[in-house]
Image (cartoon, rainbow, N blue to C red):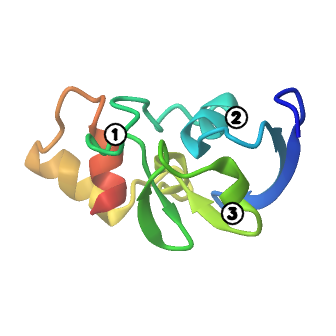
Amino acid sequence: MNHSETITIECTINGMPFQLHAAPGTPLSELLREQGLLSVKQGCCVGECGACTVLVDGTAIDSCLYLAAWAEGKEIRTLEGEAKGGKLSHVQQAYAKSGAVQCGFCTPGLIMAT
């Protein structure tokens, strides 16, 4: 397989079906950001900071270390999928009420890991 080849990834993101194309070595964080899901931050890119945390089939993962190819058939949830009908999730409400927000860069990852 040469580097210009792409693979097709069918998955669900925030409850919506997606068919995406990416190079085999693309990190999930990069693919999600390309879809406009900018809550997924690219901080350290080595799985240390947690700013890229998303849920894959309900499990929190560092999306910078998770290949997009592994998302085939998976349910992915980002911070954008947490609010329902314009209403913040219970975790988002608790963060806002307690003033637990940081600078905003790592807060999405913290919420997804909570």
Please state if 102 lies on the left or on the right of 57 as rendered: left
Camera-side residue: 38 or 98? 38
Please state if 48 lies on the left or on the right of 23 as rendered: left
Q: Name the residue: 58% across, 36% down.
A: 37
Per the model, the C-alpha gap separating discs 1 and 2 is: 17 Å
Of the residues under marks 1 and 2, which one precedes in the sequence? 2
Please state if 104 lies on the left or on the right of 82 as rendered: left
Q: Name the residue: 55% across, 54% down.
A: 81
Q: Is residue 85 above or below residue 41?
A: below
Q: Which residue has dot 2 on it?
A: 35
Across and down, in percent, residue 12 comes to: 73, 61
Q: Secondary structure at mark 3?
A: loop
Across and down, in percent, residue 5 comes to: 90, 34
From the image, state whether disc 3 or disc 1 is nearer to you: 1
Q: Which mark is residue 15?
A: 3
Of the residues under marks 3 and 1, which one precedes in the sequence? 3
Per the model, the C-alpha gap separating discs 3 and 1 is: 22 Å
Q: Amino acid at mark 3?
A: Gly
Residue pushed farthest left? Answer: 98
The answer to the question of whether label 3 and label 2 lie on touching residues, with beta carbons closer than 8 A, is: no
